[in-house]
Image: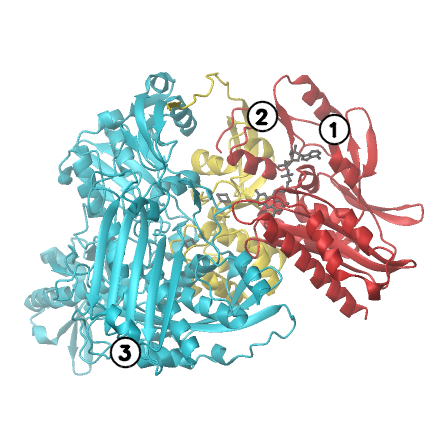
Amino acid sequence: MGNYTSSILKTSRIRPDGIEKVTGKLSYLTDLQIQGMLYGKVLRSQYPHAKILNISVEKAEQLPGVKAVITSKDVPGLNGFGLIFPDQPVFCDSVVRYVGDAIAAVAAITPEIAEKALHLIEVDYEPLPVIDDPEKALDPSSIPLHPNGNLLHQASYVNGNVHESFPHCDVVVEETYQLPRQMHAYMETEGGLFIPEEDGLSVYAGTQHGYKDRFQLSRILDLPETEIRVVSSPMGGSFGGKDELNIQPYGALLALKTGCPVKIHQSRRESVCAGIKKHPMKITVKTGATKEGKLLAHQVRILADTGAYATLGPAVLDFAVEHAVGPYVIPNVETHGFCLFTNNGVAGEFRGFGGNQITFALEGQIDRLADQLGICPLEMRKRNLRKPTDCGPVGQEIAPTNGDELVLKEIAHSPLLKTEKAHKQDSWKKVGTGVALTMHGGGLGFGRLDPAGGKIALNQDGKIQIMFGFEEVGQGLLAVIETLTTKAIGCSTADLEIVIGDTDKAPHSGSSTASRGTSMVWHSLERLKGPFIEKLVTQASAISDYPKEQLVLGENGVWLCENSEEKLVVTYKQLAEEKTVSVETQFDFPTTPNAIPGGHFLYSFAAVAVKVEVNLVTGHVKVIDIDQAVAAGPVVNPIGYLGQIEGGTIMALGYTLLEEAQMEEGRYVTNNFDSYLIPGIQDIPASMHVRAIEDLWEGDSYGPRGVGEIGTIALAPAIARAIYEATGHWVTKLPVSRDEILQSRERI
Amino acid sequence: MMKKQTIQQEHVFEQQLINISLCVNGQEQTIEVEATKRLVDILREDLQLTGTKISCEIGRCGACSVMMDKKLVNACLIRAYQVNGKEIMTIEALSQNGLHPIQNAFLEEGGFQCGYCTPGMVMAVKALLDEHPAPDEEQILQALSGNLCRCTGYSGIIRSILKMK
Amino acid sequence: MRTLETKVWSAKDIYEAWEIKASVKDSSVFIMGGTFLQTKWENGVQYPDHLIHLGEIKEYKQIYSLQEHQVKTIHIGAFVSLAECHKHPLIQNDCSLLADSIGTIAAPAVRNLGTIGGNIANRIGDSIPALLVLDAEVLYFDGNEIKRDSLENWLKQKEDSLLLEIIITEQKASVQSHQFANKVGRREAFTASVVTIAGRFSIEENGVSLILAAGGGETIPRRLRRTENLVNHQDIETIPLQQITGELIKEYNPIADAFFAEDYRRKVAANLFMVEWEKWREKHG
Ligand SMILES: Cc1cc2nc3c(=O)[nH]c(=O)nc-3n(C[C@H](O)[C@H](O)[C@H](O)COP(=O)(O)OP(=O)(O)OC[C@H]3O[C@@H](n4cnc5c(N)ncnc54)[C@H](O)[C@@H]3O)c2cc1C
Ligand code: FES
Ligand code: FES
């Protein structure tokens, strides 16, 4: 055991937030408490779909200790929110569309009283038929959940002609893949503290984009954005799940209504019920190839269950459509995606962003074709791989890259692929191995507002402040900022002060999502370092009379660097006493020049090899070894990089084998960690290895790519392939059903 | 068909208050609390010890792990009436004299990311090492089986423990 | 669930516990570690108006052994924590089947709180199948007197009683015996049981002997007597294995949930039985 290794040289410093985290001293925003604060609670719907006939709050208001009960009548601005369009009511007053819909909120002097008050709010419902399946939603006879019907978004990509080319294929494989509703399961549930201020409101609540929350809250509260301060970091995990607003509107409204600070911290049950999830998808694919193993045609239909409201549903679908052919060249492609409203839990942003689902289908097809053609799966992939300067998957111009080729070559050397397949001890255990490949776009893509930026300053105390509007969700962004800044500027960590996640202090940097954080910090510094260093050395030169060409920034101040002589010329503190300095930059995340909505420009790659053991007594699949190669540019922070890949991999293991936020008729069956099972320490393989490929294509000037998502994509199809090798059964539905495995054995 | 949300019968419950004495991180505390108040709330709210986290509230994640009379327990499952006279140790006690070796190992080997499971995880590792100073594979896997971590995938945590061997 | 609207009573001894129970008008329940009860409440079962806490009772907190009629008996106090039970040398050495099954319950922190009495008294605890195979007896207080009976009988009782001790009589050493207790959960550890099956094969003078018990999830564990009878007194070489697993599948009556159907559970129980059978055959030729 404990064989968890990597090719990455470990040189990391201890991460800046480390000591506070391991000692328990770090105050998360849900740990904050202040004198006189009230406790907020939200009343959620009793029905997945119903008309609201009446709401009466009098009894709740009369309960001693209750300070406010609010409903839609108390929303001064827009009664709606949503990252793309605000179709989710802050409070429902005429119809509820899922069990997480809010109807009222209470502030009281204790959490117990607030809870009790919720039970005293009387709501009369008229239940409506529940649309719990996207196929049903698509049926024209179903009742429309929104004014424009049940089709939230449709996206397509067509190239060549699949219908004409299928007859020319030597083999054609057709399959339907079903992917589950995964829960982010961040350990810290949503919550925070809301403090009314003389000139507005302070919001201390985790999110992945503080400025966006400020914008959305300003619309709801009808307050100018400048009167709202959002402190959004640190967070006990997010994985995409806290990007959309959650409890913020309620905390904010209650605080403004009562004039008191209000704390809300959702219970796990509330979090499950109201929180967003990963999109369940049903993907039907028909793929054809020649007997030489050349892919000719690929036809894809994606049906995504987006639940009751839009949030980022359209963007997730676009991403899945874009990645339908992954890193392969297929001359004829036809992809149609449909994102449908249902009365199920809301689906939205989730680490992987549609990539997990579509890659499971794509890699599944490649494996099935390879199997039918008798071609080695690795070879099959190699034969169809794009060339480094080829276009992207939807024919768009992208930054040239051979990451796919490199990871594939690397994984071919994996020792686990050469292991003995027969099980040594137990005749009822079967062993199999599998490989899969993925290509994953970074940033939000073409046509989406994706501004980034940062600021660097020498402040009055002589500290170099580096400021980004990003959040620390656990991904190690602080360590990335520290590493990149000290390297770019030349100062030491002690000279540095990092400011993030506070709209009053940090500039706009865009969202901490889409694997863009690391990349955007690097890009910002590329722009900031020149002018900032120039300003400081000019100033130092004026003070010291040394020519500025001989001056560099270093530990504690500006140094003379001439021939072999090195000496401190002037400290940052001295410089700051003369004059403070600041440099700011704003730019957009690089996107493809082609007008393809959501089309990406920068991609990262991963190839995974996995070994599983299938227990034929119980149908249980145990992953025993994982080896993976990742190409995402230079490694900025070794421990952080490894942690993202390993952690993402185990999240993917859960997705493949364990996790599903199961719903029955629009209600969650899995309400807490007793029934929603994420992997525990005994579920992880005894051995894992990560190989980082840092090379970029010659002339690539885009620096390190993020690795937040790439580790979560390729494991599922690799496991499916390994199960096939072990049992002869192709899995098409996740999480893998043990019952199905047992039944498949009976058929043989 | 119309459905009324049923309303619980309104009856006023007089909370039963009890006096409890307990020793938390070496300090004697005597407090008056509701008899069924949870230890995790007493720690976080009455004693301002927010290092102990809360995540599932039903003993299913280990974020609230503390030691009671030198044994690892879930502070969300224990109520005031069960803690009178007990000795409680929380994450805050571990670094009273500088970083504990477990904490150093977590820092060096990437035993945490978001850090939310970390206090509970560190306490569980402490309980493990108190019992087995040089734990084997089976012992590590057993000892940490009740502590969930969503960020690290556990490998960094296992590396941290192996490093201390 | 935060602070409850319930009154807590603490009993000095079992008699006082019983008196309190008899004296309170509204709903009440005995509570030890509370680990099982709290899980129920969180999942929507209404908690009672009174909790009668047994944790202060000084007796029935030991594990010890006695010689009774020349055989060794092991006595486990009902208020002993699962963790203590798991680690105790008497259990580790003389009742390893029980030790193994306790090792699969919850996780260490929960086992430090939960008790063996609470595990049995909740009727679906994972320790029960192993205890049934060990032919355990219990000592209990029914409000009038302290009685001793087999665990199997006690589990069938409808009336309230207080469990005081679990008594295990040391098995005659049988050279060719093989015992097992398997729990299959939804993940590797720290999970509710889907199927729990325990058993013991041995060769007695009059042929093969089998004791078999199964439970899992919400299924109340019980002995599978019809399956046992098919095996007992048979010649090991001529035992009709197919027929036996067929009977097991009929006799085992698991309760389904949102995750696993009855059929799956039956199949797994039968498969586990077969594997153990093979292990036994291999072990003893
Ligand atoms: C996170 C978690 C995981 C769990 N996992 C498992 C598992 O894997 N397997 C498993 O079997 N259980 C599991 N449990 C349930 C529980 O922990 C165990 O069954 C434990 O043994 C119960 O003991 P307790 O002292 O806490 O019982 P309590 O909750 O106090 O009581 C349980 C029931 O027994 C009654 N009772 C208690 N003591 C006595 C007595 N001496 N005489 C008569 N009646 C009594 C009570 O009235 C109550 O009805 C889990 C619980 C939690 C919280
Ligand atoms: S909060 Fe106590 S175990 Fe999860
Ligand atoms: S570090 Fe985030 S849950 Fe463990």
The chain letter for the residue carrying disc 1 is: C
Q: Amino acid at mark 1?
A: Ile
Number of labels in the image equals 3
Q: Nearer the viewer, residue A131 or C211?
A: A131
Q: Which mark is residue A695?
A: 3
**Residue located beneath label 2 in the image:** C48
Q: Amino acid at mark 2?
A: Pro
The chain letter for the residue carrying disc 3 is: A
User: Distance from label 2 to label 3 (Cα)?
Assistant: 65 Å
Colour of chain C in the rendered structure image: red
**Quadrant (top left, top right, bottom left, bottom right) of the C terminus of chain C:** bottom right
- Element under label 1? helix
The letter of the yellow chain is B
Quadrant in the rendering for residue A504: top left
- Element under label 2? loop
Comparing labels 1 and 3, the label whose residue is closer to the camera: 3
Quadrant in the rendering for residue C175: bottom right
Q: Nearer the viewer, residue C77 or C224?
A: C224
Q: Nearer the viewer, residue B117 or A322?
A: A322
**Residue located beneath label 1 in the image:** C14
Relative placement, left or right, of C221 versus C8 is right
Colour of chain A in the rendered structure image: cyan
Q: Amino acid at mark 3?
A: Asp
Q: Which mark is residue A198?
A: none
Where is residue B146 drawn, in percent x and y?
54, 51
Labels 1 and 2 positioned on one and the same chain: yes
Labels 2 and 3 positioned on one and the same chain: no
Where is residue A228 drawn, in percent x and y?
18, 39
